[in-house]
Each structure stands twice: as C-alpha cells, then as structure tokens.
Image: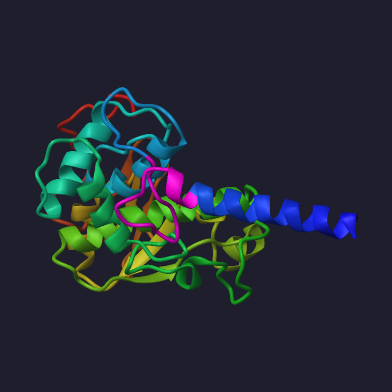
Amino acid sequence: MPRLRALLATLAVLVAGLVGVGTAASPPAHADECYTWPRTLSAGATGADVAELQVRVAGWAGYAVNMAVDGSFGAQTSQAVRGFQAAHGLSADGVAGPATYAAIYALQDADCTPAHFSWGEVDGGCGQGGYAGGSVGEATVRQNLLRAMWRAEALRERMGGVPLTVTSGFRSQSCDRQVGGSGTGQHTYGTAIDLVGASFCGLAQNARYTGFGGIFGPGYPGHDDHVHVDVRAGRTWSAPSCSVSLGAATRSSNLGG
Ligand SMILES: [Zn+2]
C-alpha cells in the first residue's frame, strides 16, 4: 500500500497546488473565459498582455491609424485605450486597468470574439468552413480574423450600434479564385471581411477611423454591394462613388505600436 499512499499524497499536493494558485495570485476584477489581464498596463509596457490589449482596442486609435499589434505599449496604444475608454464612459487616461478590462470583458465572448461578430460568420467561404488552404497557416488566419472582428466591432459601435453582417471572411486560395479573386488576396490571409448592414459610403468612411488599412467600397470595381475592410499594414482606400475622399490622411500613421 505504500505506493498508493504515496500516490494519494502526490495528488493531495497537486490539489493543494491548484487551489493555491487560485488564491495566492492577486484576484482579477473579473475572471474572463477568454483572457484575463494580469496587470495594469500603460505607456512603456511590453509583453504578450499588451498585444492582447492591442488586438481589442486597435479600432479606437483614431483617423488613419492602423496600429501594429506588437506587444509594445506606445503612443498609438495610449491613443487607442483613450478612445476605447471615452466610447465606454470611462475616464480617458490611456491606462488600461480594472475598469477598462471590465469593459472589454463585457464585450468579449468566451471564444474571444467581440460581442457582435462570431467565428461562424468569418470562417471559410464557398461553403467548406474552417481556416485551411489559405496563404498562411490556420493559427495565423484566426489571429488575423480576430483583429479584423475587433476593429469591425469598433466600426459598429462608432456607427451607433448598427447591426453589421459579414458576407465573406476567410477564403481558401481555391475559394478565392472560385469567387473571382486572385487566390492570394487579403481574404486568403484572414485579414479581410466584407460587410453589409449600413450605408456603404457610411461604412467606408467610418472604417477610416477604426483601424482598417484596406477599405474598398462603392465605385471600386466589384464593391458596389458590400464594403471590404482589412487590417493590412499601410493604407489602401478606395470608394470613388462616395462624396468624401477616402485618401487624405490627417495624422501620421507610423507612431509605432
Ligand atoms: Zn473583400
């Protein structure tokens, strides 16, 4: 029996250890099923938790700012946190602490998608579902889609909570060719989503403020029945039928993360 007793003792230690982890760490304000930030973050911070924050606030950094998700809390991240805080009735100090996290948790589903977008509407087009067969691996596709969805959530909110529908998200290379694409476009990376649900010019114009590097809308070939937005680096905007130009930049977009 000593072996059994030893096993039981080991189990007891393991259980105690598990309980200990739960009680010894400083308790988060709200344990979130997707991700719980372990600390308050402000300018100068670096780490994976900064990158998690950047994914969720990137749509609030302002006009023509397509901020990097680089794990480094710089000027654009401060700006994005302030924008998110102001939009959610919080004191806009640019520091991400318990109140800011609580607002993010309230907006975040257990599968890490924002409240009004879901994995089911952005996975493989052409009826096959999933995230395989793209220009990058499935994990990267999903990471890119998550970034696009959180920026779309900001766009939805900026437009007064208008329900937006995704008509196309990730497409495998073969699917992309099937629908007339090049087979290597933004949709094959998971960086792009096509949206309907509001005036197309309104969507295209507002998307300039919510972190999208690529925007194609009315007047751009093939884009009169939806607005395409993507999180590519840099800026490529075109919606010639809309009265307001999409091209003019009023703010430097290379301030760093
Ligand atoms: Zn598209």
Q: What is the magenta segment's predominant secondary structure?
A: loop
Q: Position of residue 117 (x, y in %)?
A: 37, 68
Quarter location, residue 199: bottom left
Q: Is residue 186 left or right of residue 193?
A: right
Q: Position of residue 133 (x, y in %)?
A: 68, 58
Res 184 visible: no
Nearest the camera: 70 or 94? Answer: 94
Residue at (40, 27) in percent of width and height = 46
Q: Is residue 77 left or right of residue 15?
A: left
Nearest the camera: 41 or 248? Answer: 41
Which corner quadrant holds the C terminus? top left
Q: Which residues are magenta?
A: 22-38
Quarter location, residue 229: bottom left
Q: Is residue 154 left or right of residue 195?
A: left
- Magenta-drawn stretch contains 32: yes
Nearest the camera: 142 or 250? Answer: 142
- Magenta-drawn stretch contains 108: no
Residue at (66, 50) in percent of width and height = 13
Which corner quadrant holds the N terminus? bottom right
Quarter location, residue 223: bottom left
Q: Residue furthest bottom?
A: 127
Q: Is residue 16 left or right of residue 153?
A: right
Q: Residue furthest front?
A: 1
Q: Position of residue 98 (x, y in %)?
A: 25, 47
Residue at (27, 34) in percent of width and height = 77
